[in-house]
Amino acid sequence: MTAPFAPRRLTIATRESALALWQAEHIRAQLSSRYRGTSVELLGMTTQGDRIVDRPLASIGGKGLFIKELETALREGRADLAVHSLKDVPMELPEGFVLAAISAREDPRDAFVSTEHDSLASMPAGSVVGTSSLRREAQLREHHPRLRIESLRGNVHTRLRKLDEGRYDAIILAAAGLKRLGLGTRIRALLDADESLPAPGQGALAIECRVDRLDVQNALAPLADRGTTLATIAERAFSRALGGSCQTPLAAYAEWEGDRLWLRGLLASRDGRDVMRGETENVVADEQEAAALGVALADQFLTRGAHRLAVSQA
């Protein structure tokens, strides 16, 4: 598929962390390869989420703090598109913005990283595991109540350094980020979805632009991956219907095969003592049907009393 044209110049707004820059470079390479006559540049920015590293995300406004400055650059015309980890994108975009493309997914699983231990099961009681995610924390507490779970902030390299300094016995990170940065050898074990169901959109990249920039949307369209797009739309619809946010331990993961989508969801209390799981599967032909599948699973959760878990996080 070839888009009819691309602007002569495209500027990508990106955070300046190593992972964010890798992601932006990845999209830049795809655009430069497809549109030989287009100059693609990066606009590096430091976001509020990058500046505040001493408090949990849930207490300072959530993952949306990583993209607000990028959206300002889009709104003001200083950039044409922004590249995000989809799991960091709020379920509701501000008016005037659209996710123009969701590219092929990397490994969506969580990764166990430790210098001393081979798995969570092999860690002695009282061992300290670091994570910044309430979703991971709830599932860790459910499956491994003997372990101590402590907050861990910072970019990938900062988190690895804290582990190497002995401040944690193990940490849990997204496998996708480690692999993209060439740090896959740090992974001691990959956590199966049954043990740690991923976050909605985990492992996928989202490209955002303004709704009125149809030229940019047309240029980005060929970068979209159909299976990843349908899967993550279902995941995000499930989360949106349940009011998912950084203050809610919520997980959703969909797998696309043939013409069918299998969606699994989880909602939990932070202490891992109250965990609700569910799944659904159906033929999905388009984005509307993918979203409907996510809403249908959320409705099942609500029928089973999911409101109690949403209320318990307040």
Image (cartoon, helix red, strand yellow):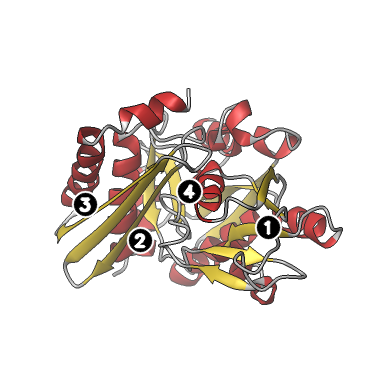
Question: What secondary structure is marked by label 2?
Answer: loop
In the rendered image, which residue does mark 2 sit on? 224
Q: Secondary structure at mark 4?
A: helix
- Classed neighbour count for the residue bearing mark 1: other residues with Cα under 10 Å, few (<14), some (14–19), many (≥20): many
Whether residue 25 is visible, yes or no, is no
Q: Secondary structure at mark 1?
A: strand
Please give left or right for residue 191 compared with residue 162 in the image.
Answer: left
What's the amino acid at mark 3?
Ala
Q: CA distance from mark 4 to mark 2?
A: 16 Å
Which is more N-terminal, label 4 or label 1? Answer: 4
Residues 146 and 10: in front is 146
**Mark positioned earlier in the residue sequence (1 or 3):** 1
CB within 8 Å, label 1 to label 4: no
The residue singled out by tag 1 in the image is 171
Camera sees residue 270: yes
Disc 1 residue type (three-letter) = Ile
Q: Where does label 3 land, which residue?
A: 290
The circle drawn on residue 87 is 4
The amino acid marked with disc number 4 is Lys
Q: Residue furthest bottom?
A: 185
Q: Which quadrant of the structure image shows residue 127?
A: bottom right
Measured in 3D between alpha carbons, the distance from the residue under mark 1 to the one under mark 3, in whole angstroms, is: 33 Å
Q: Position of residue 276 (x, y in %)?
A: 34, 44
* Residue 12 located left or right of residue 216: right
- Residue located at (44% from left, 42% from top): 209
Of mark 3 and mark 4, the one earlier in the sequence is 4
Which amino acid is tagged 2?
A: Ala
Q: Which residue appears at 35% of the width and 27% of the height?
A: 308
- How far across and down, in percent of the image, does residue 39 sit? 56, 59
> In the rendering, at what x and y percent does residue 149 appear?
66, 47
